[in-house]
Image: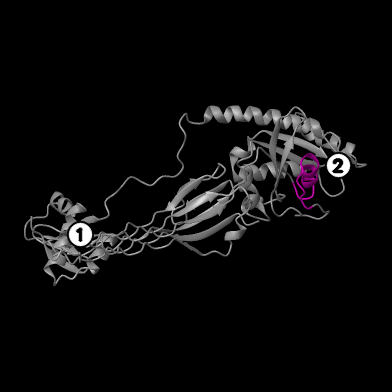
Amino acid sequence: MIDFIKIKVKAGDGGKGCVAWRHEKFYANGGPFGGDGGRGGHVYIEVDTNETTLTKLRFTRLVKAGNGEPGKIKKMHGADGEDVTIKVPLGTMVRNAANGDLLADLTRPHQIVMIAKGGKGGLGNYHFATARNDAPEYAQPGEIGESLELQLELRLLADAGLIGFPSVGKSTFLSVVTRARPEIAAYPFTTIDPNIGVVSLPDERGFVLADMPGLIEGAADGKGLGHEFLRHIRRCRVLIHVIDMSGEERDPVEDYAIINEELEQYDPELRLRPQLVVANKMDAELAPDMLEHFREHYPDLKIYEVSTLLHQGLDEVLYAAMDCIEQQRVVDEANEPEEEVVVYRYEPKRPDFEIKNLGNRRWKVESAKVDRLAEQVNFDNEDDTYAFARTLTKMGIDHALREAGCKDGDQVIVGTYIMDFTD
């Protein structure tokens, strides 16, 4: 089961603006006519209901959107970069691998979020024409697209989850009460991938049931398939705890205690989740004695006696599970906020720069964007320098310098260049 991967994503860079001139009949001295660059492609993540695991992304190291094309002559806009969409199963959580922040929680079919934004295209030279300079030789480079490393974690969305030790009969239970066809065999860890089926009751009610990989002692510490199992059951409204009463290999009293201890160690809230205790394999010869032994240790528990092999006692469990699920839905809805929670949005717009006072009337503009723009400027060309200064003004850097206390004649460091501030 591939349900936890890391992947890098890179949105496309914006295309460079074009430097061009109008050369048409009746326009002998045509002005600047260069178009804007196209924006870089965005990276999206979308729920695909046909996917059940993250296996297809297992060997994907980088997903990259297309870059925007440069602007063209006659003020024509460069083509936008191609967007890319990563398809993931329902229940996938997307985190920023650098800090663990939750970027998206994909809980609805076909839900889609933009996870990395493409860079804006650079402006063509016609934007920089002024009365002082009616023939600018300068066009903006495109912005760099966002890039980050993502952590994708799949948590199955099921109303009820079957829990218990390996080979206690969970897969058989699922196959009998649903149309799911999990692998079934008489050896531990038959279930490596969680299996899901839909239970349809005669009264036209129904719910989604998941058969999870079996737990072992130490699962909360990551032993066996522990963490892979436990992260999935967090979203189950009801737990159906299947216990082997055959007496052939397992002690039901010990098994029950160990499973619940592992749940509590991993997440204390799981121990409080509604739990139906199912005594399975009641067709075995020693089962009545083992059940009596179990009741002596847990006299207050309601226990459902079943034989998945003989299809006996299952309806009572399913109706009880359905009632519990409906009760939990009411509780969950009551605890939900009235307004829909937006699980992912871009942070409010922040300046693309930071002003630092270096002392002795020296200031530094720290900004990857400004550094990149500065590298494109020919400071020996007065027009280029003037256009660059206008760009800094539009970005609000002049205002920010004044607010910070910068005065006429102070030195301002931009990238690898030192400029004199003029108010």
Q: Which residues are magenta?
A: 165-183
- The residue most toward the front is 25
- Front-most of 387 and 231? 387
Indicate left or right for 279 with 218 as reference. Answer: right
Identify the residue shown where x is 41% and y is 59%. 11
Residue 396, percent from left and from top? 19, 51
Task: Answer few, some or many: residues within 10 Å of disc 1's Cα (few below 14, many 20 plus, some between 14 and 19).
Answer: many
Give percent across and percent down for residue 273: 64, 35
Q: Quadrant of the N terminus?
A: bottom right
Residue 360 vertical position relative to residue 237 in the rendered view, above or below: below
What amino acid is found at the position of numbered circle 1 in the picture? Tyr
176 or 37, nearer to the observer: 37
Circle 1 or circle 2, nearest the eye: 1
| Label 2 residue SS | loop
Q: Position of residue 311 (x, y in %)?
A: 86, 38
Q: Residue furthest bottom?
A: 380
Q: Is residue 123 magenta?
A: no
- Relative vertical location of residue 201 with respect to residue 165 in this rendering, above or below: above
Q: Is residue 420 rendered to the left or right of residue 25?
A: left
User: Between marks 1 and 2, how big is the CA–CA gap?
Assistant: 81 Å
21 in relation to 48, above or below: below
For the C terminus, which image quadrant? bottom left
Which residue is disc 1 drawn over? 126
Q: Residue at x 63, y 34 (%)?
A: 272
Name the image colouring: one colour
Residue 357 visible in rendering: no
Question: Label 2, on which residue?
Answer: 281
Q: Is residue 28 visible?
A: yes
Say what secondary structure mark 1 lies in: helix
